[in-house]
Amino acid sequence: MSKQLALVIDLNVCVGCHACVTSCKEWNTQGAAGPLTDQNAYGADPTGTFFNRVQTFEVGEFPNTETVHFPKSCLHCEDPPCVPVCPTGASYKRAEDGIVLVDYDKCIGCKYCSWACPYGAREVDGEQKVMKKCTLCVDRIYDAKLPEAERKPACVLACPTSARLFGDIHDPESEASRAIREQGGYALMPEWGTHPANHYLPRRKTGKRLHADELERHDNPLKVDGRLPRPSPDAPALDDVTSW
Amino acid sequence: MSTEVKTTTCYMCACRCGIRVHLRDGEVRYIEGNPAHPLNKGVICAKGASGIMKQKSPARLTRPLRRKAGAERGAGAFEPISWDEAFAMLEKRLAAMRATDPKKFALFTGRDQMQALTGLFARQFGTPNYAAHGGFCSVNMAAGLIYTIGGSFWEFGGPDLERAKLFVMLGTAEDHHSNPLKIAISKFKRDGGRFISVNPVRTGYSAIADEWVPIRPGTDGALLLALNHELIAQGLYDREFVARYTNGGQLVVTDPASARHGLLAVDEDVEPDNPLYPQNQLWWDRHSGRAVLSHTPGADPRLFGSYRLADGTRVQPAFQLLAERVQPHTPEWAEGITGIPAATIRRLAHEMGVTARDEKIELPIAWTDCWGNEHQTVIGNPVAFHAMRGLAAHSNGFQTVRALGILMSLLGTIDRPGGFRHKAPFPRAIPPSAKTPTGPEGVQPGKPLAGLALGWPGSPEDLFVDADGKPVRIDKGFSWEYPLSVHGLMHNVITNAWRGDPYRLDTLMIFMANMAWNSTMNTDEVRRMLNDKGADGEYRIPFLVVCDAFQSEMTAFADLVLPDTTYLERHDVMSMLDRPISEFDGPVDSVRIPVVPPKGECKPFQEVLIELASRLKLPAFVDAGGARKYRDYPDFIVRHETEPGSGIGFLAGWRGADGSKALLGEPNPRQWEMYEKNNCVFRYELAPSYRYMRNWNRGYMEWAQRMRLRRYGEPILVHLYSEVLQKFRLAAQGKWPGRRPPPELAQRVATHFDPLPFYSAPLETQATDLEKYPLAAITQRPMAMYHSWDSQNAWLRQIHAHNYLFVNPRTAQDAGIADGAWMWVESQWGKVRCMGRHSEAVEPGTVWTWNAIGKSPGAWALAPDANEFTKGFILNHLISDTLPGDTSNSDPVTGQAGWYDVRVRIYPQ
């Protein structure tokens, strides 16, 4: 089976710090997919091209609230709806590694692909007027000049909680595949049939079960200081009233 | 096209990660985390990865600026001048002050990681009026824990999440040690650790906590007392740890008639080796049933009871007094204050106690304690805590933090695996031995200050006051109003200088602090005071110098603006003399080496200080003949020693003539090169037997003394009971043989210098009509905006261009405020218009917002319609530095600004 590169994002440890957001912008604006332009950088409603954004939402009612930080970028679908709708063939999925890319030279900025994408992962660059999106740092991950450990997307290297795993999800032995398999990895909106390559790992809770009889142990320090005295032998006991 | 990669140290926030900066044709193109750096191990945060845009900011200052003649302060009307003119102006003014009254010059810095140099400059100049921003930030955390366990969080120590099983985070603490903590929390969670967050708000790291325990702001002290209550009531404390490593077993004189009431009983026949840190306290030995010298071999102290010494003096173990103190503080009592159900508090205490007791770690590391006992293993009780400003920034924070230190100690977690661990140069003695002068005679024309500007008082005799008990410092630090204000009180400076209370200043120099906006408690008043003139037509604060890299709200008020460099344009040191980046296993320091030249005429503030110090001929900066000693800052760093021949300099790595020595050694002319070759970081790994139990570890103590990290080697017992505080209380009660507070402050000192932790509502809560202002209002920092230095960053402001007031939906509905609607938030001090956002992640009695997102129009080179002005806001408008009765809105022990204490009401626009 051919390779399918993907990100597996662990919501269990993502603290929403946005390191992935700006490190992505920083790499890609100066790289092959750049520039990622900004509009009104120092004015009202500043906006610009980002390949990756973190959304934060709340689940549940106080006090049973979960605050979820949700990094989102192109999911590199196995059956990407953005590709067939492209009138110029600018959007394409690479056979060799499954990365979905846009050829800026062919893109006419018609936005069909962004309408087709159910995940809102594509953005038209405000200046260049072409569609841009996550490339999985395709200009880094095969760069033989980089040490092997650094041939990963910028967001993966940046993430302080290592919440972003990168690998081939068609290889069952990859770290990414194992995480999906063992930690309940799921794809977004599977009902759309897009088969997103990127997966998410859910929150996992560690609890602590305490039994009442674990509270006190024979070596309770209060005994040393006479604060848990043994009852007096003179106090009434079962021994006084039973003779069988 | 040429590409090169240089390493240096980030300073987009105060975390100080190692970075690799990629340059193309000399231009910064990419900044990434340095995988070879011990702090961040290759990761980088949102700010660090946006550092490239800092270089492009249109708000950069590039030339020295002088306020135009006739222009009002705050109007931002400047004319460029040359550095020669700027230095000449400063030299003339500063030389005149130094020759007559050096305290007329005040230097306050927002940044507190250049204190080794800024502090040296101030001291050499001779002014006591120097501090960084700690009084505003987290001094309660530093002082509360250092006076209890001899160390604290962040630069001083932290949670050992590598080995912890339970991690409890109290209050907002995200922006301290951020990347290392993110790395550690993630690994901790993946390893199956349990993470509990106690916080009014569920954001930041709390988002991924296994359990969120919402609490009302400013009530953490009540929670901590109840946890201590439950641990003692259940016998869930580590008795051996308490008995041997804290002063819990030491006897306290509890005899109101005695002159030593409340002090530790001592064997007066035993002459202490070191009168500063005597070791002649007593235990009541449970084996022999009599008083013996503390730590007598074979003895074991009683922790409870009441005894009489041979001379009839009534004494009780300190632990008994602690147990009595927390006895009424049941979980039910705390529920009413904190809003946390009693059953939850009880369960938390049980989880902590049982985890510490039953999941012990034992490392096969032999060590010897200070009393000569040999231990084959190091024991760990794997419960770790972290807390910072959330606990600290309340006027009751000092005692709250004391209660936390005691909780950590009852659980037996101090400098042990899986608990709290120190970072060099901590632990320090309680209190540390650095002291300020003790009276106005310490300030003399033409002379260096006779002591440090900031120190660690151990008794009333160490205060920095005149014969009438009045303050010597402009911020009233180390006076009876705030005796343990160990980080100074930056938030008092402008108000006091404007009032002329205790006196007027001539020149106020501010480095990297936005006192006219978000780094002040009463923004509008401060702006007015900065611009206010006396009857003579002169500004009440006559000369204001501001050094910063960016044009801000504060620079607009300056008479002279000095353009600083960014972190990529300068040499810098993260010094062991200041706040290094040490790790649990040993000292670490690091440097910055410029990767690009300064923009325009920008000059690093360090170079400004070296230049001024040389021109003013401050003794440490000139040779015996009065000639300039140091060419520039890098030269100073290499050659300066704390004393001639001391071998102690700003940098600990590659010392000695050939760079072969660590920590101690003669200057090495090639020291910068060696740092540059080693990723700009120096790391010293302690021998395994010196890595734990350092308060009481003889091997470590002797090593630290040899390396001159410590002057003395006495063991540092945890102060469950604070004799230091009792000395101040005795003075306030008229029972201390030495200095006593002025009568108007006696009651305040007597109340707050309680040797045992207690809970009282924050001062502002007590001074507020809670019917009218029922809600607490606090701020937190978004991770993309830790610290406010880069709020104009083109990328980061796309993440947070404006802020909302987050309100629990029930609270909002009661007030008639729709989600996203414009609304008012009002305190007794002021009101501000903002947009409300409903949030289930905040407890209903609290409203909150992201700090320092809102800006003042005209600042930061943002367009006039920028969201920061039109939609953003800061809560500082609602906060006062003064409370009714003209007392400062600060902790009465440390002077920590109580800026998380404000009470508000909300209503629709």
Image: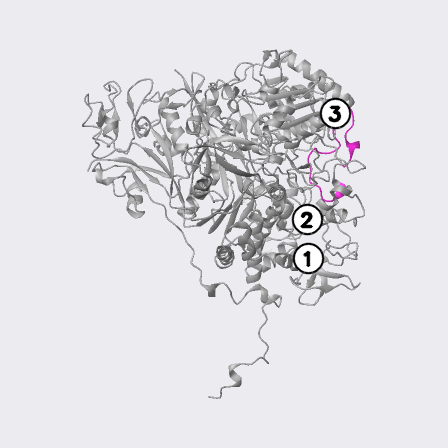
Query: Is residue B456 rendered magenta in the image?
Result: yes
Q: For mark 3, what is the residue?
A: B102
Residue B336: x and y in percent read 54, 53
Range shown magenta? B438-461
Q: For mark 2, what is the residue?
A: B714
Q: Is residue B477 left or right of residue B24?
A: right
Residue in view at x 58 percent, y 68 percent: A228
Residue in view at x 49 percent, y 36 percent: B907
What amino acid does circle 2 point to? Glu
Give the label, 3 or 2, closer to the camera.
3
Res. B250 mark: 1
Residue nearer the viewer, A235 or B487: A235
Give the label, 1 or 3, closer to the camera.
3
Res. A62 mark: none
Query: Is residue B896 rendered magenta in the image?
Result: no
Give the chain letter at badge 1: B
Q: Quadrant of residue B745?
A: top right
Residue in view at x 49 percent, y 26 percent: B791
The secondary element bearing badge 3 is classed as helix
